[in-house]
Amino acid sequence: MAMPELTPEQRERALAKALEMRRARAAFVASLKSGEVTMAQALAQAKENPVIGKTRVRQALRALPGWGVARVDALMEIVKIPDSRRLAGLGKSQCESLLRGLREDPLGNA
């Protein structure tokens, strides 16, 4: 299926909306990084808030203080969440497993 032709005005509006969403998502990730928002709060809001819901799980986890590539990879593998999954796409049991995994260290570090 071919993409519809957009008028210059429609294209401009679409680009502005995309930029606004990227900025909002960056602000959300920054709030996770600063500890202002917890992962539990983010998961609770993911279904209603499109900015939070469209954030990839991996990106949200990497924003958490102390969570680098290795810990995130280990947790995603344990919880069996695909790399492409977004926060709004997680089921109830996946959310519970993810939060449980955040409390326990998947690498076994003290």
Image: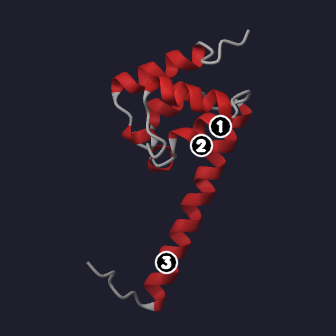
- Near mark 3 (Cα within 10 A), the count class, few <14, some 14-19 or many ≥20, is few
Distance between mark 3 and mark 1 Cα atoms: 31 Å
Which mark identifies residue 13?
A: 3
The mark closer to the camera, 2 or 3, is 2
> Which of disc 1 and disc 3 is earlier in sequence?
3
Q: Quadrant of the N terminus?
A: bottom left
Say few, some or many: other residues with alpha carbon within 10 Å of mark 2 (under 14 / 14 to 19 / 20 or more).
some
What amino acid type is highlighted by mark number 1?
A: Arg
The answer to the question of whether label 1 and label 2 lie on touching residues, with beta carbons closer than 8 A, is yes
The residue carrying mark 1 is: 62
Helix or strand or loop: what does disc 3 sit on?
A: helix
Which of the pair 30/59 is nearer the observer? Answer: 59
Q: Which quadrant is home to the C terminus?
A: top right
- Amino acid tagged 3: Arg
Disc 2/disc 3 C-alpha distance (Å): 27 Å
Q: CA distance from mark 1 to mark 2?
A: 5 Å
